[in-house]
Image (cartoon, grey):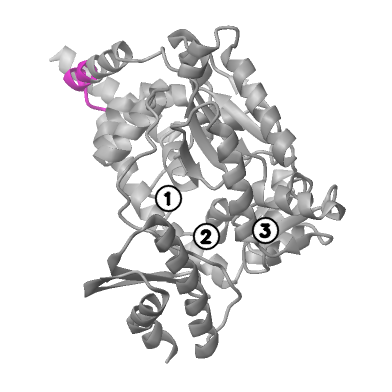
Amino acid sequence: MDNNNNNKNINNNESNNNKDNLCDIDDKNKIDDENVLYRLSLNPNKGGLQNVDKEKINKIIYEVSKGSAFFKNAKEKEKAHFEKIKEIKKKYLFLKNQPMEYEKQQMKNIMNKMESDRDLSQYIVHVDMDAFYASVEELDNPELKNKPMAVGSKSMLSTANYEARKYGVRSAMPGYIALKLCKNLIIVPTRFERYHELSHQIRNIIANYDPDYCPASIDEVYLNITNFLNDNPNYTPSKVTEELREEIYKQTRLTASAGIAPNICSDMNKPNGQTELKNCTDEILKFLKDLPIGKVSGIGKVAEKTLNELGIKTCGELKENMVYIKELFKPSSYQFLLSASLGLGRTKIENKWKRKSISVERTFSNTSEIQKLEDKLHEISCKLANDVKKENLKGKSVTLKLKTSSFEILTRCLTISKYIYQQEDLYKVGKKVKFIYIIFF
């Protein structure tokens, strides 16, 4: 009887402590504008934004955005996210008050098995070009150097140079907000053909170190330098990476940052730097213990906030709470977070896969004029046809994605009976996708 009472008191105390540590979910019965700000605010984990006055910049972003379609869209998303967090918190508080001894032992066994399978024999490098689009524009127009500059339009920016980042200007920010942060900001339009030209040149350089490299995007590449090291015993992983970056600069006059380990390292010493995490389990876990979860590639703002609301802010705390994460998140998310908490990633670079789709996307100024929309559709279909021809592909399903002026994203797909690849066919089928006519006609 006394033991039961003691256990009940312990559970009550734990429940009270948990409620103190986590904001009371019942007190928050509405979404105010301030709670939307995190979606619009700076990500201080990005290169070039660490030393800016975050509070001042976020205040400007808030004042400029408030009442706009951009802000309203973020607010709608935040409402849905708030409800999701509320449910996750309830379940989390419940789980924290359960013994879960069996589940904890199971998690320990899973982690031990993953640790025993850790492959420390491979040397993986992640190369990330520095502010790639902006750097290309500075290369072709030296007058832009040392001036705050961004690439994109007043509607949306693709990237910003490091001079502009000092003012809080960043990629995926509406240009009109960026101009409020930096009145002298120069915005130049995108030139994708030029970016692809230089990207191809950079990849040819990387191929000398690993012909089986894997592109992650137009300005990012993973490569395995293990074979190169075996063939060149006088080299170290750091020396190979430094030589690679120097060769990129020598041939293109563009700088790159790199990480020798999981790709979190490539962002640790930007711009034009590199970081090596030794192939040692103790070093990896020590590095991860206090690493903010927002630094992990794949954990965006929304996931970061969700975890923060559970009191999880570092990879070390993430590891300690994995038994609960398994119950709270989808299996795919849980598996990813588990690997991240242990610093485990793929050690085999695969650049051969069966392509399931190919796409082209462009950002342009707001318009509701039918002819302008059809002109843009024609332009995109031309580019897509060229890409399809290069890849020697054909398809039967055409998907059209549209972002409205209220920032709502709409997609519709039309599947036809025969395979197509020519521009006129792509354009013809694209015009048949009905939602664009429902909205504008």
The kind of residue tagged 2 is Asp
Q: Is residue 302 above or below residue 108?
A: below
At x 52%, y 68%, the residue is 72
**Quadrant the N terminus occupies:** top left
Q: Which residue is mark 2?
A: 32
Q: Secondary structure at mark 1?
A: loop
The kind of residue tagged 3 is Ile
Q: Are marks 3 and 2 in contact (CB under 8 Å)?
A: no
Give how far apart the Cα atoms at labels 1 and 2 are. 13 Å
Residue 45 seen in the current view: no
Q: Which residue is mark 1?
A: 27
At x 42%, y 50%, the residue is 27
Give how far apart the Cα atoms at labels 1 and 3 are. 27 Å
Return the mark for residue 209: none
Compare marks 3 and 2 and give the one earlier in the sequence.
2
Q: Secondary structure at mark 2?
A: loop
Residue 47 seen in the current view: yes
Compared across the picture, whether 219 is left or right of 441 comes to right
Q: Which residue is mark 3?
A: 61
Compared across the picture, whether 379 is left or right of 157 comes to left
Q: Are marks 1 and 3 in contact (CB under 8 Å)?
A: no
In the image, which residues are magenta? 96-106
Compared across the picture, whether 318 is left or right of 294 comes to left
The kind of residue tagged 1 is Asp
Task: Provide residue 228's location: percent of width, then percent of height.
Answer: 51, 18
Task: Provide residue 353's location: percent of width, then percent of height.
Answer: 32, 43
Say which of 203 and 223 sits in front. 203
145 part of magenta stretch: no
Magenta span main SS: helix
Q: Residues within 10 Å of mark 3 (few under 14, many from 20)?
A: many
